[in-house]
Amino acid sequence: MLEDSDDLMSIVVLEAGAAWPSWLTEYQRLAPNSVVIAQASAESAEAFQARVLHRLAEATAHNPASRVRVGVIVAADDPEQKRVALRQNVAQALLKAMGKVVEGELVLAGDSDELNQSRHELFALAGELCKELGSRRINVRVRFTSAKSGVMRSITASAPDSAPAASKA
């Protein structure tokens, strides 16, 4: 992960109905100045997007020395809501806000363990954002709130001399 610094910001965008990910604190430690923008349950996607974009502009203009290093969009799994455009516009605004950092992290997070349309949309968005980055050193990640990690436990390799006798030549 990236080293931490007092002038770095993390910005978290939380859609209505999304669960707060337990792993989020590891990113907020990297950029201790946090801004959290949460969608109200009755707020439309368009109104939320406008509020997020305004708050991003405000946060980055308020203190020119502060830099956005971590951006997180926590997507709700709600098939009734069409939030593809919202997520794309907010993600692009976060990338723009990260323009001054040497290294950055943009995390697209989902709160469903099921393979569904929302997951496909997040992966597709990550792919589009990676195309736009060019040579910028910003990592785009997709995470889900599953209790299981995508990392396997390490397996100790057996020593060649401990192989069964039948396999020795």
Image (cartoon, rainbow, N blue to C red):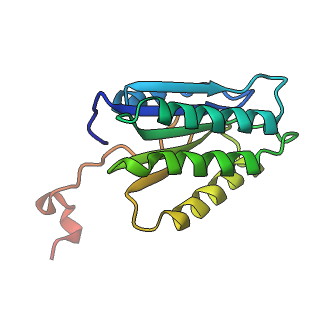
Q: Viewer-proximal residue, 125 or 166?
A: 125
Q: Please, is residue 18 above or below residue 119 in the view?
A: above
Q: Please, is residue 126 above or below residue 104 in the view?
A: below
Q: Viewer-proximal residue, 156 or 54?
A: 54
Q: Please, is residue 48 above or below residue 104 in the view?
A: above
Residue visible at 65% across and 60% down in the picture: 124
Residue 69 rendering spot, x and y as whole percentages:
40, 41
- Picture quadrant of residue 147: top right
Q: Is residue 140 left or right of residue 26?
A: right
- Picture quadrant of residue 82: top right
- Picture quadrant of residue 44: top right
- Residue at the far left in the pictured view: 161
* Quadrant showing the N terminus: top left
* Quadrant showing the C terminus: bottom left
Residue 142 rendering spot, x and y as whole percentages:
55, 48
Q: How many marks?
A: 0
Q: Is residue 41 left or right of residue 90?
A: right
Residue 16 seen in this snapshot: yes
Residue 151 seen in this snapshot: no
Q: Viewer-proximal residue, 70 or 127?
A: 70
Residue visible at 72% across and 38% down in the picture: 49
Residue 118 rendering spot, x and y as whole percentages:
73, 47
Residue 46 rendering spot, x and y as whole percentages:
80, 39
Q: Viewer-proximal residue, 4 or 151?
A: 4
Residue visible at 44% across and 39% down in the picture: 70
Q: Is residue 47 left or right of residue 153?
A: right
Residue visible at 62% across and 27% down in the picture: 37
